[in-house]
Amino acid sequence: MAAAVQIISKSKLEKCEKNSNSDDNLNCTTKIVVNMAVPSGSSGGEASIVAELVEVEENSTTKMQTLRIPPIITVNKSAAFALYQLSYIRDVPYKPEEYYIRTRKCEPDASSNVVKICERLRDEEGHIIEKTQPICCPCGPQRRMPSSCGNFFDKLTKGKANTAHCVRFPGEWFHVFGIGRQTLEFSIRIQVKSGNKVSEVIVGPENKTVTSQDKFLRVNLIGDFVGYTSIPSFENFYLVVPRRGGPGQPQELGRNISMWMLLERVRFTLDGFECNKIGVSYEAFNQQPNFCSSPYWSCLHNQLWNYWEADLNRLSRNQTPLYGLEGQFERINQHPNAGGYSFSIGITEVLNTNLVIELSANDVEYVYQRSPGKILSVSIPTFEALTQFGVATITTKNTGDVEASYSLTFNCSKDVTLMEEQFLIMKPNEITNRSFKIYPNTDQASKYLCAGNKRLYLSNSHFFLCIIW
């Protein structure tokens, strides 16, 4: 996107100062200093601007001097984003599930022929994994899973009916990351073309002052005019992302950003011993009190899949998600070198960044143009005594053969408030109108005098005119 550059102050011609302890000195005796504001693009996105440096003001004389070969300054500002460092915590299941098997021979060490999926689990070396055995509950209508106990004959011949319960973790797993403090990141590339010479530097929040290799250009990033207010803090949240490959610490986050979620830390159990929290373990499920009289799926609420489906319901009603990053933030993880132990979100505020650009002026040549100018007419409609101000319209003309800059002002009696000088540029034979508001110092009817010459040649000069009303 193209954006307009705002020049904060006049480009100035200053003496170079060399610091023996610095490698950032320009190779110069005089330098041109430009103070500018660089805006962001729409919604904090990328922006590009091009400015031509036409005139500079000499500090000793305050005169404006026109450059023979105007340097062209090109500024490219990247999108701004907040970067967060991550620390791996653990893996958690997406959807823990409770299973039950109707049987008459449930025992903690029963084989799969009896309790099927609820048989005790074993690791890769064949060792039994603790707390994975089934929990056996008697039959009856008020039990965890209501079931019929059958008749007396069935109890004698087949045994008393019961149910085997267990928790298993099929399906996806997610990595959990702690989130550190955020840093603001962006870069600004400044290129200056002066004749056949091209100099370039890149600055940013972590590298604020940079000098080009040819010592012609130096840029200092002063800062942003207003601090960002929309950068969120996630220090009380965990980031969860789909697990890639095997369990344990991943090498990178992956690109399945649509499944990334931010959830408060209080929703997690890091040791697995708490029910109804993300990361619940076999032990928490098996040791919950009043197991057989508790509702089916007790201890397994408030899991990742619950929050994900809550977001889907909100999206179906055109509402912003509460937990998923997509839909809440822009430009997720689009920062350079994305994929490591960090993630980022785009900053949507449009703010101006203050840059001070310094150019070596050793080889700069100046052009002085003088051209006559003439006041063609002055019009001041009569205004009544109680009116706050009147308006004077002045028509001027460049009567010379070259384009030049002019300044126009009044030199009035003390009963008229001083008026600000106006500057204008006119091409040869161009006619321009300028308006001045005239403020008398009294509300009494009177005559006032503005005196001066009606025609003058230009070189940092003024028109003057004489008016009585």
Image (cartoon, helix red, strand yellow):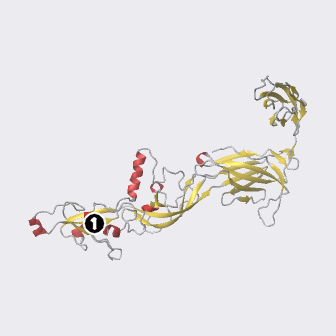
Q: Residue at x 87, y 40 (%)?
A: 460
Quadrant in which the N terminus appears:
top right
Image position, residue 434 (x, y; %) = 79, 30
Residue lying at 61% horizontally and 57% vertically, measured from the top left: 184
| Vertical order, 111 against 458 (above or below) | below
Horizontal side of 240 relative to 354 (left or right) equals left
Relative horizontal placement of residue 265, taking residue 447 as reference (left or right): left
According to the picture, the residue beneath numbered tag 1 turns out to be 291
Q: Is residue 50 above or below residue 133?
A: above
> Relative to the observer, which residue lies in front, 252 or 180?
180
Q: Secondary structure at mark 1?
A: helix
- Quarter containing the C terminus: top right
Asked whether, in this view, residue 30 is left or right of residue 151, the answer is right
Q: Is residue 250 visible?
A: no
Position in image of residue 284 (x %, y %): 35, 68
Q: Nearer the viewer, residue 33 or 141?
A: 141
Please indicate, yes or no, whether residue 194 appears anywhere in the rendered image: yes
